[in-house]
Every structure is written in C-alpha cells, then in structure tokens.
Image: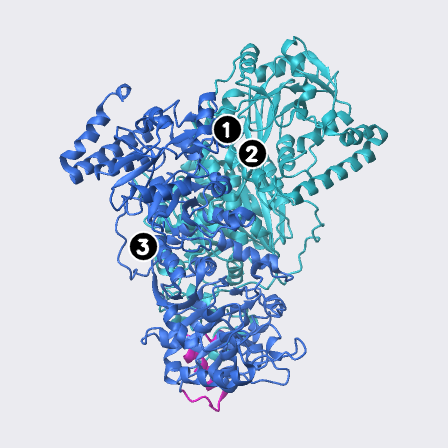
Chain colours: A cyan, B blue
Amino acid sequence: MLPRGRPRALGAAALLLLLLLVGFFRLGGDPESRGAAGGGGAGGLDPALTPHVPPDGRPRGTAGLDGDPPGDHNRSGCHPPRPRPPKCELLHVAIVCAGHNSSRDVITLVKSLLFYRRNPLHLHLVTDSVARNILETLFQTWMVPAVHISFYDAEELKPQVSWIPNKHYSGLYGLMKLALPGVLPPHLARVIVLDTDVTFASDIAELWALFAHFSDKQVIGLVENQSDWYLGNLWKNHRPWPALGRGFNTGVILLQLDRLRQAGWEKTWRQIATRELRTLLATSLADQDVFNAVIKEHPGLVWPLPCVWNVQLSDHSQAEHCYLEASDLKVIHWNSPKKLRVKNKHVAFFRSLHLTFLEYDGNLLRRELFGCSSPLPPRAEQQLTVHRVHLTFLPHELPAPQPHDVTLVAQLSMDRLQMLEALCRHWPGPMSLALYLTDAEAQQFLRFVAASAVLSARRDVAYHVVYRDGPLYPVNQLRNVALAQALTPYVFLSDIDFLPAYSLYDYLRTSIEQLELGSRRKAALVVPAFETLHYRFGFPSSKAELLALLDSGSLHTFRYHEWPRGHAPTDYARWREARAPYLVQWAADYEPYVVVPRDCPHYDPRFMGFGWNKVAHIVELDAQQYELLVLPEAFIVHLPHTPSLDISRFRSSPAYRDCLQALKDEFHQDLSRRYGAAALKYLTALQQPRGLA
Amino acid sequence: MLPRGRPRALGAAALLLLLLLVGFFRLGGDPESRGAAGGGGAGGLDPALTPHVPPDGRPRGTAGLDGDPPGDHNRSGCHPPRPRPPKCELLHVAIVCAGHNSSRDVITLVKSLLFYRRNPLHLHLVTDSVARNILETLFQTWMVPAVHISFYDAEELKPQVSWIPNKHYSGLYGLMKLALPGVLPPHLARVIVLDTDVTFASDIAELWALFAHFSDKQVIGLVENQSDWYLGNLWKNHRPWPALGRGFNTGVILLQLDRLRQAGWEKTWRQIATRELRTLLATSLADQDVFNAVIKEHPGLVWPLPCVWNVQLSDHSQAEHCYLEASDLKVIHWNSPKKLRVKNKHVAFFRSLHLTFLEYDGNLLRRELFGCSSPLPPRAEQQLTVHRVHLTFLPHELPAPQPHDVTLVAQLSMDRLQMLEALCRHWPGPMSLALYLTDAEAQQFLRFVAASAVLSARRDVAYHVVYRDGPLYPVNQLRNVALAQALTPYVFLSDIDFLPAYSLYDYLRTSIEQLELGSRRKAALVVPAFETLHYRFGFPSSKAELLALLDSGSLHTFRYHEWPRGHAPTDYARWREARAPYLVQWAADYEPYVVVPRDCPHYDPRFMGFGWNKVAHIVELDAQQYELLVLPEAFIVHLPHTPSLDISRFRSSPAYRDCLQALKDEFHQDLSRRYGAAALKYLTALQQPRGLA
C-alpha cells in the first residue's frame, strides 16, 4: 500500500517502481491485497478506491475483491494475501446477542474464532439479561487465556433503536449494531462487528489487517450482498431500501469507530433512516437496510471487503460465484432464517465446517497464546478443575414467584437422558438439572429434547450443561450448579434415578406452607426413598399401594441390601404408620433426600466420583442445626439401571478408596475448624465400628 | 523467486528493481518465501542457498528459516509467506506404517492433513499386512473425495534395509524411508514423507510449495534437529552418527525423487551407511542417522526447511526457540517415545492441537473439494449410509488355527462397555466385537481398556470401531463387520447383554466336533437364552443351578413376559430334560442365538434400529436349509440394563413402525425372488394372527 500523502504521479517509470518498493519496505503493508482488491481492473493502486456502480448494479470496487481467482497473481506480483496485524495486537470484536438460542450460536462462533486466532481478543457483548447470565458464567468458567470480555446492556440501548419499525427476525437486537459507535468505549478506534450466525474458517487477524486499507474517508468495511434483494426485482411491488447495486451485507462489519464518531455517524444514520421510513414504513432487514441507505448516499464511507469474509448462505444466495473461485473461505454466514437447514448445492460442505465447531471440545481452546504475555493476571492455582458451565442451555422461563414453590434439583450425564421424560411426567413443577456432557453430547442432547414432545413442551425445566473435563465425575460441583440456579424459595435435592410420587410436587408445597419451613423452622424435610430391582414396574399411585408393594417384596427401602445405614435414620417402620411429620436424629452415613430452602449450604465440591458426596452435605445441614423432619406421605422410588461407567471404572480401585479416605479426613478437619467442639460428634460417629450404627 | 538461469548481476539499481518486479509478475512466485528463508541475512535472493556450518554447529541457512520474527517484513517487502502450489495440483505424501498402534496414529495425522488441505492428495502407504487390512478398509469406507491411496508391501522392502543393525524404536520400518525413491512409482517426481507421529496445523500445500525453492542440486528438504543429539555431548562416550551441526530430523521430508534417482541415491546411502556401520555398528535413530551421514558428506543435497514444519517435541527439545518466535506452527512432531506424555513447558498447548484431530469427527472430512473436479469417479448413490470402519482398533493376535474353534460375535455402543469385563471372564475364547462410537468415544474406549487389567490382558478380542453417522443404530451392519472379521471356522452370534455359561466356550467346541458341524451337517446350534430382571445375581455354574433359579423365579426364559414367540420354538420344556441335541422347526419371529460356520449368510443391513434384525437372519438360515439343533447343556443369561437411547428414541414413533413394516415387506419380496415358492411359508407365517403362534 502506498504511504498516505506521498505524491502519486511521477514521470519516470524507474522511479515509480522504486517508489513502489519503498512503499513495500516502509509500511510492511500488503501490496497483494490492494492488487487483489483492484484485480478486476478498477483502482489498482489507488488507496482512495470508492465503489462505482455500473449499470449492472454491481459495485465495480467489489468485483475485484471476489476471492482470489487463479492467474491473478501475475497481475499483482505477490502471493495470495495473508496480511496480519502486529503480533500480539489486541483485536476488538463486537456482537449483539439476546436470548437462549443466540447464546448457543454465539458460543459456536467464538469457538471458531478462538480455534484460528493467534492474537489476544477483546469481545464486546451487547446482551439482554438472559444472554448476559449465560455468557458471563460461560467465559468465567471457560478461562480462555488472552480473551477479555465486556458486557453492554441491550436494555439501555433499546430506546436508541426502538423507534424504527422493523420486520426482520433479528428484531430490535439487529438494529442495535447501528448504535455501537456510541455504546463502545470512546477510546476504542476499531472494531469488527459480527452477527451471531457466522462461523470463522480463518484467523480473524487477517480480517483486522484489512483496516489498513481504509482511506481517511472510509469508515465501514462490508462485503457485497450475495442475493438480489436490493435489486428490487424479486417479486412484483418488491420495494427494498435504497442500496448501491446489490447492496452490502452487515453480518461482518469493520467499523472505524473514531472516524465514524468524528463524522457524526449517529446523526447521519438517524436522519437517513427517518427520511426513508416516511415512504418505506419499516425496515425489512433491520440495521442492514439503514447501513445500505447511508452508503447509497455516502458511497465514500465504505471499503468493500473481499467476498470470502462473508459467504452468505441465504436461500437465493449467489455466494457460489465467490467461493468456487476462492477455494479459500474465511467466514461463513448462515443468514437464512432456516440456518443449517438452508438449501444450497454445497450446504453439506458448509455444514461440516459449522459442525466442526459446534462439536469441538471447548476445553482445548484453553491453550495459551504463544509469545504474547497474557494481559490477564496469571491464573490462580486451582485445586479443582474448573468446568465450563453453560447455564440454561435451552429456552427457559422464570417461574412465577410463589412463596412455597419448590424446584427439583438433580444432575445427570448422557446415560441417564432416558430418565427425563418419566421425570417430567412425575414432577410437574420447576426443575434445575445439571448435565455433564462433552460439547458433542450437548448437541445430541438438543436433538433428544427436540424429538420428545414431553420435553419440548416444558419451559420450566432449566438444563445447565457442565462440560466434561478430567477422569472423575464431579458430582457435587454439578449439584451446586443446579442448586445455584434453582429460582424458587425451596429446593428438593434429588437424584436422577428416582421418580417422585405423582403427588409429591403438590404435597411438598402444602407441607412447606403448613410447617412454615424456612421462616419459623430451620428444617430439612426428608423424602423417604425406595427402590425396585425390576425394570418393569407399576409405579404406586399412593402410600397404601407403595406399602403393598413393599410387603410383596416388589419394592424395598433404598439400598436395603447393600447399605442400610444410608437411610436407616429415616425409620421406615415409623414411616409406615406415621400420619404427621416426625423428627429424626442424624447418624453416621445418613444420606436422605431432602427439601430445604434454596439458601441451604452447598455441596462440598471435593467429593468427586462416587462416595460420601451426599453424606457430607447432610453432616453440614446437621452441623448448621437443620432439623430433620420426615414427611409421612412423601416418597420417591429408585429405578434400576446399568452401573455407570464412572462407577465401574473407579469402584474397584484401591487408590480411589485411599483418596476418598483422605478427603473425608480433610472434610472433618474443616468441620472442626468451622463448628468447633460441636463437630466432634461426626468424627466420633465415623470412628465407631460399622456394625454398631 | 527469480527465474532460474536469468543473469543475476546488473549494474544499475533501477534496473535491478525493475527486474525484481518483472520476476514477481512473470512467475507469480513468492518473493517473500525467499526473503523469509534468507531473512537471517544469509543468501537473500540466492536460490542456490546451501547450508554453511559455522563453528557453533548451526547451519546458517537454517537460522534464517526459523519462523517469522516480527519486524522481518521490512527487510523482505512482502507479508509472511503463504505460498501455495497451483490450485487443484495433486500432492503426494508417503508414510511408512506398521501394526495396530501406528495405524491409529496415522489416521490422526491424516485427519489433520485433510482438515487443512485444499488440494487433492495421493497417499502412498508402505504397510505391513496388519496396517494394510486396517487402512484399506478405513479409506474404502471413509470415502473422502479427492484422496487417492496406494499401498506398498513393507514385507517386500525388508531385504533392502534389514542388513542395517538398528537400535531405534521404529525398528526396520523407520529405515524403509531410505528406500522410498526406489519403491514409489518411477513417474513420481516429488513426495512429502511423513512419520506417523506428526500432526498438521496448516495446509500441506504450503509445504509442497517449498519444493519450488530447491536448486537443481538440492533434492532433500529437512528441518534441523531441535535437540543436541548429533552434537555428541549428551553423555560421556556418546557417539552419534556424523551430521552437519545439530543434524536434521527426518519426521518430515521433502524428496525430489526424480533427481534423487538420477543422482544414484540408493548407491550413495548404502555406501555411506556401510562405511559408518563399520565403526558405529548400528543406527541409533534409524533412517535419520543415515540421512544425516549422507548430508554431512554431500551438504549440497539438502534444502533446510523452516523449523515450523517439524516442531520436535522430544524430551530435550529446543523447539521452543522455533515456535516462540513463529506463532505460526505448521507441523508438530511427537518424536519422543513418550509421545503425548512427553514433558515440555508448552505440552498442554501441543496436546490440545493433537486432541483436536484425535477426537475430530472424521465424517466431517467427507466434504468435497471446491473447484477441483474430483479425479475419482462420482460416488454411486448409496441406499444405506456407509459407515467408516476401523478394524482391530487395538492390538490383536490371530487365533492359532484350530478346526473347531469358535469366535463370539457381538456389537455394542458406549453404554455397554461395562459388559466387556464380565464377558471376558465368561468367554475365554476369541471374540470379534463391533463398537459403534464417535471418534471422541473411541478415545474414551481406549482409556477404558487401558484402565482394565482384564481387558488389557486379552489379545484374542478384536475390537472393530464403526463410526457413528446418522440417527439410526445400524445393528445389522455392525453384526456384519464383527462377523466378517471372525477368524475361526465357527462363530457364536450373540448379543452384548448376554453372559455365556462359564463352560460354553469349551462345550461349543466339543459339540461342533462331535456333531461334525459344517462338514457333515449344515446346521445352526441353538444356545438357549434366559434372563434375570435383578441386578444382583449369582450366575449359575451349571444347568442344574440354572434350572433351580428358573424354578425359584429368579430367572426366566428370555423375553418370557413380553415376547415369548422370539424363543418359543427352542422348546424350553424339552430342554430341561434333554441330554442330547434335538432338532426344532423354524416358526415366525424365532430369533435364537446360534453357532454357525463363519461362512453363514450375513445379516440384512437394511434392518436398523430395533426390530426384526435377528429374525430376518434366522429366516435366511432356514431358507438356506440350516437345521436348527438345540444344545442341551448350553445357555446364556441376559442381564438387565437401562433401555438404550436408541430404543427409547424410536420405539414410540409411528413413522418408525411404518418404516419397519415397509422393510419387512421388501425383505419378503427379496426372499421370494431368491428362494421362489419355498419362501412362501415365511410370508404365510407372518400373516397369521399373532395369538396363534
């Protein structure tokens, strides 16, 4: 690229050549990009290239940018451009994201970004409260080095764009891109703006490097639209907003923020939008209509990006013209409302790129950036693995506030998905479930829910995905995620293999109210647990039926055969006769399923795999002087299942048992520290010979 | 790059510049690569650059090739080089691969290659019979467009290198790289040779493009060794083979085959190796020692590759000097015997690159190459999905030929891994198991086996991985894979949820011999099936014990409650009393577990998911006039398990049941076509009301 301000016309050919070379050496710029940019014959070395629209409606400046046709090298003298910004330069990216589904999309986009990037990134996320909750937790737990995140409240931006009537599916949020220059920090000079439905197939630094080609007047980098929409000939009376030829697509935007602000961007777009709305009444394509109307009037503002930076897979896309030549795709844009189901000759190819990142193990992106000292403080040494957490993976509605409402809390992995339908039938109330999955399994889970009418119909079940990492099953970390996300005043701490009595949800709410749980009484309500060893099993519809099954030997009290201590204090004999709730005393190894206020103590995350994870929690409740109150009409039944892989992998290992013992010791030391002499009883109980309890 | 043969010295500076530009435009070459290559100050624009070894032992030509230090651009005038060969040029890659474990490695390498490539590839694989069996099946079923495969028999190469005593873990196979110029087709002019333990992080076309930098004399492209091995100072009396300075690593080699052959490569390396062996007695690093000895004597042969093309993660690697500067890794080389467990400051980063491809869904690589017309014939329209198949995923020894030996054949997915240990305890004979897994699950499976002493100890269990694709469980395709790989004369066609009587393996072999199965008698031996609904269950050690459990209600005949037709013809009442094998007649819906000669009919692959898959096979046996002979002392017991996801997903779908009915109709039409009137009975039986059977 020519140094700016240097006189451009010199008489002698040799001197011109010399000048070119000086330009190469001085700026370290990329003559090839200009060459490729002007490869269609327009502009060539003129950095002030502005699009000029010939009668066919195709901006000539763009034509030359379409990829990298073979043979063009001869004209440009260099190889295909792979310009990069200075090593370790911080690159800024802005994304508007709202709701559960867009939050999933944006994560796939970010995974593709991170896979190819070699620079530190700063993501500027304009979010509604749902997306903020999801993405804030995700990035905190993801801990990707050299990635900064800033959030901006979409709610605050609404007044700036809500006056624009809009028919596009992106709603108000699409329009917010127009307001970004005013929203992003004033010191921020450049930003790349991305739609949530794009996938990177290359290093974003190459895109960032294109800023260097902007002239003083050029402030917006955009790829030409790859459909005929703005030509206005799609159907009779089709009246699109004004645009230069095919217009530009705003799925990928380079914004020179400093100059936009200086040039009075906000005033400009508002004026033009107001004027057009008088006749057009509403935008059809949200922000894109307004951007195009502004550019139509001020064509000098735009620098046309090579088409490969926004390959648009809409229904009537002509993107083929771009990518068949290019063989070097940079960014795919799923800009059809049909998304991955769009029809397109090469959609299988594009889908495979997208699926790559959809299913990519995000933990692998925690890798350090080489050679760039991380601008983040070095990570504290963590004793426990921090698992990536994606809260409310599927759309979820907040429960209406009810003073005695109770959320069923549980955790599961892929091999227990089959339980979900039955659980939904048995528990009509809210649930908060933590799922321990790989990225690929999370996609299987989505398909599983979509295929189930029962599951799809529920909006009060919150699924929180905790991504797998490491060999041990982090059972208590999972429970804590699910517990922390329960939004009712009470929680029922259950396990996924249990089905509740059909009446349990109603009965618990009534009991909570009658017992004044949490207000007058600090108590944990015990729900007695039973089990069947048969997998064909008629679920008892009442306590009477349950007792009959118990007497006939079809049901047993839970773990009656292998571990009666776990539930002995519930006192099943007394329960048979009980008509009113009754108090029981804590004893060693007691691990009942309980209902407690949601501000109860968390589970101890040190207990991983299978052993003592619930026991420790009940000890904690007892130490904090929760009464243990057994409910006479409540019950749950454990269904049989194949032992999980995690159990069978570790149950037999002596090292594992030693490790569990060490954890127990540590736990008791912590108890003494926190509860003093009162904690002594737990240690004493533990040291009694097993037969006595 | 300067056109070869053009006079290089011209007086006037302006003319020199002119010449440079002419060079750019004329060749479309990449001046930057030369610039970066010579960026350290050596050579500059001299295409005949040869390494020159200064006293520090570091070839000067290589120093400048180390990556792409920032600031270098100014000197070179262009951006970092990303040279590419002409679009759609076919690139040739040669790999020597032997045994089960290397075959797994090479697939990960190939996945990384395919992920980044944009050119058609021809893989030249020098394999032993094990690797050939695995890789031939894999590539046939993978069906990646624009990938050609040729196999070369390592056995035939052995005499060419077996005379060289070698201490390296790669054994004879490493040495075979020396013989490649003679083995590969004479018309092949260039090839990239790769070790199985490298991972690509970039497009191999960029590496291929470096051939263009070779002078007429340069015939081998290599990266400098990143350890001090060849400096000979690692320990007292350490006597490495002769090398230029640090020497070169042969994990990645560019071979200019045509010129190597002309220059008498074979004679040269043999002479030099013979001479060195007189004093050094054996190679320590296999082919690498010989390559280095040759290069020491003929330094003009080598063109030093930039270090990023072979980042060596050995134990004492100094690779850091390369990659910290480069920020642009191209190829990772796990050249320590510890492989992924090597200790290295940045190993987590490299491991994440490697795991990316280890777990990458290979089906996604079936995507077409854009813009290159595939040189393969267009794929025939397949009615059924072709699943990628990786035979003998783990080391496996062929069973010693025994005339009456029998292999247990079954298939499973991840949720049944827990069965494998018990199955191994119950069946001491050979097994052929097809596992339906994702690429990531295949890695979990490896860890599962490694953690199990029982499984690790067995070499007679062949695990064949069939990669998941599509929503339906291809149960019969899986069975066919396992059946086709059974290597004994007889097979026991079982299911994974059954445990055989401890004596079954011995009893079957005796029965096969006594009944002269397959030779005198065309029969299927029926193994009666039972089931327990209890998880905790003492396995009967004899028929008498089994009958006692049956009488006490702890055991049932298989599917006695829901589907007695499936096993009714076995006639359990008669079996109780039977002392000798007895004939039974086929009836509708009969699906016993049988022992047959391994050349029995295959399963009908159309039956997917859950229904009729075994029934159709038994119909086929009956149609082919196999007698059904029940064995009086044989039994298997089905253990309870959670219904699989696949079952619960489809069992309830009416569309699924309609589809199954259509398949049954199709199957019966095929039967009539093949067996004529004799097949009528199956249709008649099917049409009888269910209650009568």
Local crowd at mark 3 within 10 Å, few (<14), some, or many (≥20)? few
Label 1 SS: helix
Q: Secondary structure at mark 3?
A: loop
Q: Where are the magenta residues, as a range?
A: B6-32
Q: Nearer the viewer, mark 3 or mark 1?
A: 1
Q: Nearer the viewer, residue A479 or B288?
A: B288
Relative to A284, is B683 on the left or the right?
left
Q: CA distance from mark 3 to mark 1?
A: 60 Å
- Disc 2 chain ID: A
Between disc 3 and disc 1, whose residue precedes?
A: 3
Kindly identify the residue that appears in the image at 63 percent across and 13 percent down. Answer: A510
Q: Is residue A383 visible?
A: yes
Q: Main secondary structure of the magenta part?
A: helix
The disc label shown at residue A419, or none:
1
Q: Secondary structure at mark 2?
A: strand
Chain holding disc 1: A
Q: Position of residue B440 (x, y in %)?
A: 49, 48
Whether A286 is among the magenta residues is no
Instruction: Give residue A56's mark.
Output: 3
Q: Earlier in the sequence, mark 2 or mark 1?
A: 2
Which residue does the numbered mark 2 point to in the structure image? A412
